């Protein structure tokens, strides 16, 4: 259990958008969505209001078994072959998966238009229950091309500033809503124990304490003080449980070692590393929990009744609903019909099918009441309806239409400002041999694969699933430096002249998602090493900025360089990096991971090895 003090006085969020400071006498400051500021942590788990319990019970009472199964269904955009099926089957939810798009225009307005249309169709079902629409807004609502992209959680875990994380999640909520979406599949609460894992960057760090502290703040920011307010989104704490604690070599995915693997720890250790961090996030009111693809002692979490039902819903008192992960039930032993039964009987309430939704509904209908009890069916649907009620979906004035005022603010300056601050605070200075901060106006040579590439700077879950290819809007390191210094640039650093004051070389990992990011070699690639070598050869002092989803093995590079900064996957606001480089913001970031000196040290975590890491958890220089 963790002690997280109720957020003391929550700083007022002035996310002014489009205001032109200084030209008009300023009106009395207003706080947009002041009523949604996060409420202090409750003692004990959140539970639905008596009014919503009553509403859910009365809606439930008039549903047929097929309509109940429909409410338990989540279908992905690409698999909804006939939009009218939403009404026909009273489908409860849709999602935009990693590679689902509304068309070629990926602006918030285009997303909102597409989603508004399906919401309208869903409302025409016989019971007329509104549709929940989910997306992986894991670092901003990054699937919309104009949205602000925040640092991935690994960087936020270095900020030492849960209020800032809460604020970032608030902006994410506003932008997610502005794109028509009311459910964010975030935050990840894993303690990421092994840097070879491809999802390390989605977690706040290597300890459950970091996950609890920042994850709870993120839930508060996403959901606001009330799920009902127009700028709040439903959060999904994930992936319950054990996703970051799997044993190397146990994954069943091709070319993967850890993702979707097995956790082999005794129950007490498992609870301490992978379950306890959910307690404060549940107290903060997280409305949904997403199940992990991983397994515990050989049992897939999607069928783990003890953990999903006895522990999560029983002991921990989770009163929201449990959503399965994408095709997660398909990994269970047996055929589709038995997968459906096993998962629902284990405690899954809504299934991210995401494809064969008609088959899913039929499987549920035929299993009730013999293989899935009516009580279990009703419990699942009641939980879903209660959350929908808390979101205001059964209120008199509920509208399926996105508020255009929110759409207009997606990517606005006020929002970018919050991300810029988060970038600056997430940077961890690992070395500074007197080079930093740089002097404004200096002659600087910029190099490296990451210097002018937003896809590398943002990482996975940005526009596309793995983050490659389509770009979003933002400022690269190169363009941020060009505003403040006399900059020359060459990709491999060979263009550097001796008459340069300093070099900045930005290297890192190509973007990836999930198991595709599992790696057993975390050294820099050849191109990046060449860029650093060229800088080194020039004799000009230089700093290396590393964009990566985890600590990498850069012991030699740190040795050579005059400065070294771990910048993680900072997102769209490269200006935040320049703020630190030029000394406008003093670096304060502290490592959210122990930093290994060599591959053989991995996994390395605070307190569990005799080996000395290159830098311990919590390390970070300032000036
Ligand atoms: C991931 C989840 C994600 C879901 C929907 C899954 O593959 O594990 O984290 O929310 O896809 O895109
Ligand atoms: C989907 C993602 C999902 C991933 C993993 C992709 O095709 O778009 O949402 O997370 O597959 O299965």
Image (spheres, rainbow, N blue to C red):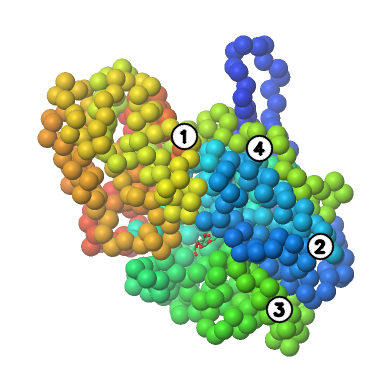
Q: Quadrant of the C terminus?
A: top left
Q: Earlier in the sequence, mark 2 or mark 1?
A: 2
Q: Earlier in the sequence, mark 3 or mark 4?
A: 3
Q: Secondary structure at mark 4?
A: helix
Q: Which residue is mark 2?
A: 125
**Separation (CA) of disc 1 from disc 3:** 46 Å
**Separation (CA) of disc 3 from disc 4:** 38 Å
Q: Nearer the viewer, mark 2 or mark 1?
A: 2
Q: Nearer the viewer, mark 4 or mark 2?
A: 2
Q: Secondary structure at mark 1?
A: loop
Crowdedness near tag 3: few (<14), some (14–19) or many (≥20) residues, C-alpha within 10 Å? some
Crowdedness near tag 1: few (<14), some (14–19) or many (≥20) residues, C-alpha within 10 Å? many
Q: Are marks 4 and 2 in contact (CB under 8 Å)?
A: no
Q: Is residue 387 above or below residue 420?
A: below
Q: Earlier in the sequence, mark 1 or mark 4?
A: 4
**Separation (CA) of disc 3 from disc 2:** 18 Å
Q: Quadrant of the N terminus?
A: bottom right
Q: Which residue is mark 4?
A: 407
């Amino acid at each position: 259990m963790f002690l997280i003090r109720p957020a003391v006085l929550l700083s007022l969020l002035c996310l002014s958008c489009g205001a032109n400071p200084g030209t008009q006498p300023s009106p009395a400051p207003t706080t947009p969505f002041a009523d949604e500021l996060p409420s202090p942590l409750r003692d004990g788990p959140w539970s639905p209001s008596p009014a919503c319990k009553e509403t859910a019970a009365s809606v439930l009472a008039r549903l047929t078994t097929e309509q109940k199964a429909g409410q338990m269904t989540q279908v992905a955009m690409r698999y909804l072959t006939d939009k009218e099926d939403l009404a026909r089957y009273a489908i409860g939810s849709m999602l935009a998966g990693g590679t689902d798009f509304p068309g070629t225009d990926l602006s918030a307005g285009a997303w909102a238009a597409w989603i508004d249309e399906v919401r309208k169709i869903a409302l025409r079902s016989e019971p007329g229950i509104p549709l929940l629409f989910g997306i992986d807004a894991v670092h901003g609502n990054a699937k919309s091309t104009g949205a602000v992209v925040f640092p991935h959680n690994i960087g936020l875990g270095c900020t030492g500033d849960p209020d800032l994380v809460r604020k970032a999640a608030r902006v994410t909520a506003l932008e997610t809503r502005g794109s028509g979406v009311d459910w964010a599949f975030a935050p990840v609460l894993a303690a990421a124990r092994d840097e070879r894992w491809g999802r390390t960057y989605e977690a706040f760090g290597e300890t459950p304490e970091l996950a609890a502290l920042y994850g709870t703040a993120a839930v508060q920011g996403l959901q606001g003080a009330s799920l009902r307010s127009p700028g709040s989104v439903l959060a999904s704490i994930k992936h319950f449980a054990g996703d970051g604690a799997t044993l190397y070599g146990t994954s069943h995915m091709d070319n993967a070692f850890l993702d979707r693997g097995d956790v082999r720890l005794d129950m007490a250790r498992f609870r301490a590393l992978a379950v306890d961090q959910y307690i404060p996030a549940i107290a903060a009111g997280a409305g949904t929990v997403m199940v992990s693809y991983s397994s515990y002692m050989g049992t897939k979490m999607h069928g783990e009744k003890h953990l999903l039902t006895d522990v999560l819903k029983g002991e921990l008192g989770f009163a929201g609903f449990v959503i399965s992960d994408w095709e997660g039930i398909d990994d269970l032993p047996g055929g589709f019909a038995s997968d459906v039964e096993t998962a629902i009987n284990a405690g899954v309430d809504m299934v991210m099918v995401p494809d064969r939704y008609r088959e899913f509904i039929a499987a549920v209908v035929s299993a009730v009441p013999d293989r899935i009890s009516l009580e279990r069916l009703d419990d699942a649907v009641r939980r879903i309806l209660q959350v929908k009620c808390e979101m205001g979906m059964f209120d008199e004035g509920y509208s399926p239409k996105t508020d255009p005022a929110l759409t207009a603010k997606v990517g606005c300056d006020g929002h970018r400002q919050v991300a810029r601050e988060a970038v600056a605070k997430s940077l961890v200075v690992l070395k500074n041999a007197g080079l930093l901060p740089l002097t404004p106006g200096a002659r600087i040579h910029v190099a490296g694969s990451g210097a002018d590439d937003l896809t590398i700077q943002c990482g996975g879950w940005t526009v596309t699933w793995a983050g490659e290819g389509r770009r979003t809007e933002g400022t690269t390191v190169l363009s941020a430096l060009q505003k403040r210094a006399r900059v020359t640039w060459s990709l491999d650093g060979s263009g550097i002249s001796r008459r340069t004051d300093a070099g900045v070389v930005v290297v890192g990992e190509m973007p990836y998602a999930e198991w595709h990011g599992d790696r057993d070699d975390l050294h820099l690639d050849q191109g990046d090493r060449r860029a650093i070598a060229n800088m080194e050869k020039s004799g000009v002092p230089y700093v290396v900025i590393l964009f990566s989803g985890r600590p990498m093995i850069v012991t030699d590079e740190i040795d050579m360089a005059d400065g070294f900064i771990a910048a993680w996957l900072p997102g769209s606001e490269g200006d935040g990096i320049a703020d630190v480089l030029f000394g406008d913001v003093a670096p304060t970031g502290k490592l959210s991971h122990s930093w290994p000196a060599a591959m053989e040290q991995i996994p390395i975590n605070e307190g569990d090895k005799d080996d000395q890491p290159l830098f311990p958890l919590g390390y970070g220089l300032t000036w």
